[in-house]
Image (cartoon, grey):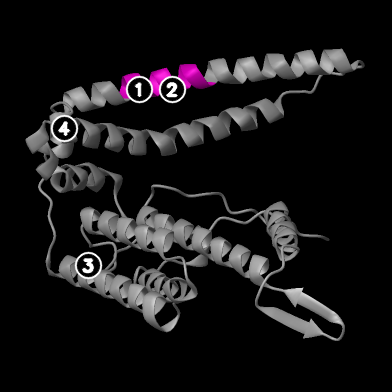
Amino acid sequence: MTSTRQRRPVVLLRPTPGTSTIHELWAGTKILVVVALSALLAFYPGWASIALVTVLVAVALRLARVTWGVVPTIPKWLWLLIFLGGLTAALAGGSPEIHLGPLDIGLHGLLNFLRLTAVSFLLIALAGLVSWTTNVADVAPAVAKLGRPFKVVRIPVDDWAVALSLALRAFPMLLDEFRMMYAARRLRPAPVLTSRRARRRRWAIEIVDLLAAGITVTLRRADEMGDAITARGGTGQIAAAPSGPRRADWVALTITAAVCVLSIGLELTVLG
C-alpha cells in the first residue's frame, strides 16, 4: 500500500494560533522592520548582510513559535528551475576560481546566483513572518499612524490605509472561493473531444466561464463586505482604531537598526 504525501497549501494573511512576543508587536513595527531589512538587502546584498538577516529572521520565527506545518510545500519543478538557473549562472565563470587539474572553474556567476536566491528566500520569509503573526485588522491603523506626517501635504493616508486593509481582508476569501471553483470544475465530467480545434475552443470556453464566475463571486463578496462595514459604522472606523508602539516595539526597532548598521559596516570595511 502506497501513501501519497499531502501537499501543504499556501497560508497567507492568517495569523497562527496562540500568542508570542512577535504576535504582540505593533503592526507598524513589523512594517518598519520589513522595509528596513528589504532596503538593506536591496542596497547591500552581501554575504554579511544575508547572514545577519538570516539569524534575525530565524530568531524571530523561533520566538513566534512558527512550525513547519504553516510552510507550504515547495513543488519539485521549482527546485529544478533553481538547479537549472544555478547551472546556467555557473557557466558565466569569473573570479574566484578553483583549479581541478587542467580545468579552471570560475565561481563568480554561481555565487551571485546563490546570493540572489538567498535574498529572495529571506524576503519571502520576512513576508511570511508578518503574515503569520499579524492580524489583518491591525494593519490599517498602523499604516494610518505611520503615514500621519504625510497628511500635511494633503495625501489621503486614511483612505489608502482603508483600501489596503480591505484588500488584505478580501484576498484570503477570494483565494478560497477560487480554490472551490477550481475543485468544482475538476469534478465536472470531461467531454470527449476528437479534434485539436474542438479542444482549443473548449479550453477558451472554460476560461471565459471561470472569469465570469470569478467576477460574480468578487462582486458578491464586495457587496457583503460593504454591508458589514456600513453596519459597523463605515470605513472611518477601520483606520481609527487606537494603535502605537510599546516598549517591546522599541527594542525590536533598536535590534533591527543595530543589524542594519553592523551589516553596512561589515560590507564597507571588512568585506568591502
- Which one is in front, 270 or 142? 270
x and y percent of residue 255 in the render? Answer: 25, 74
Amino acid on which disc 1 is placed: Ala
Q: Are marks 2 and 1 in contact (CB under 8 Å)?
A: yes
Residue appearing at x 78%, y 84% in the figure: 99
**In front of the other: 11 or 103:** 103
The mark closer to the camera, 3 or 1, is: 3
**Residue 129 showing in the rendered view:** no
Mark positioned earlier in the residue sequence (2 or 4): 4
Q: Which residue is mark 1?
A: 222
- Identified at 10% across, 44% down, the residue is 149
Q: Is residue 92 magenta?
A: no
Residue at which label 3 appears: 253
Q: Is residue 221 magenta?
A: yes
Label ID, residue 218:
2
Residue 82 placement, left or right of 58: right
- Of marks 3 and 1, which one's residue comes earlier in the chain? 1
**On screen, residue 20 above or below 78:** below
Magenta part of the chain: 214-224
Nearer to us in this view, 232 or 50 = 50
N-terminal label among 1 and 4: 4
Q: Which residue is mark 4?
A: 155
* Residue 205 spot, x, y in % from top left: 69, 14
Question: Distance from label 3 to label 2 (Cα)?
Answer: 38 Å
* Sequence-earlier tag: 3 or 4: 4
Q: Nearer the viewer, mark 2 or mark 4?
A: 4
Q: CA distance from mark 2 to mark 4?
A: 29 Å
The image quarter containing residue 169 is top left
Neighbor class of circle 2 (other Cα within 10 Å; few <14, some 14-19, many 20+) is some
